[in-house]
Amino acid sequence: MDAGMNIELLIACILSIALHEAGHVCAALSLGLGIKRIGLNWRGPYIVRERGSPWQNVFTAFAGPLVNLLLACFGPHEWRLINLVLGLTNLIPYGPTDGAGIWIGLREHYRRVSSL
């Protein structure tokens, strides 16, 4: 693999991550949740937003991986693979992933419903 290909893959990864985070921001804003801060730490980019209802939290968490899974349907093979891996790994309900946020939101919703 030559240096030009490495740069292209790096740009594709950065763009995929940026679009993933933009998906979260767009979902939060469309659901009426305010964005407090967007930043970058050793784990990668992050967004601090207002806390919403369990369903708002589920939809906002799912928006990033959904963007990647949609992007995985288009473009060159490397682009599709990067987005497929990013979208699917973020759906794993472990640690600070979007999958954990989805799981927590669903659990909160069903706890509220079952306590009625």
Image: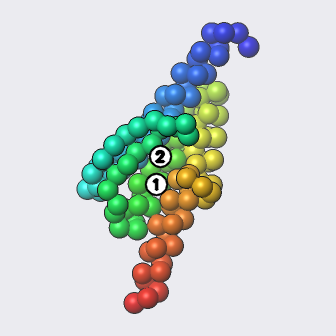
List the single residue furthest toward the right: 1
Going by the numbered disc 1, the residue's amino acid type is Ala
Percent x, y for residue 113? Answer: 43, 83
**Residue beneath label 2, please?**
64
The residue shown at (48%, 78%) is: 110
Q: Is residue 98 above or below residue 80?
A: below
Q: Quadrant of residue 39?
A: top left
The C terminus, quarter of image: bottom left
User: Residue 97 bears which disc, if any?
Assistant: none
Q: Is residue 7 left or right of residue 102?
A: right
How are the residues colored? rainbow
Number of on-image labels: 2
Query: Mark number for residue 61?
Result: 1
Which quadrant of the figure contains the N terminus?
top right
Q: What residue lies at 56% left-to-right and 28% top-to-bottom?
A: 13
What is the three-letter code of the residue carrying label 2?
A: Gly
Q: Is residue 10 left or right of residue 45?
A: right
The answer to whether residue 75 of the structure is visible from this angle is no
**Residue 63, relative to residue 86: is it above or below?**
below
What is the C-alpha distance between the residues marked 2 and 1?
A: 7 Å
SS type, badge 1:
helix
Residue 98 at x, y = what percent? 52, 53
User: Disc 2, disc 1: CB below 8 Å?
Assistant: yes
Image location (x, y in percent) of residue 85: 64, 40
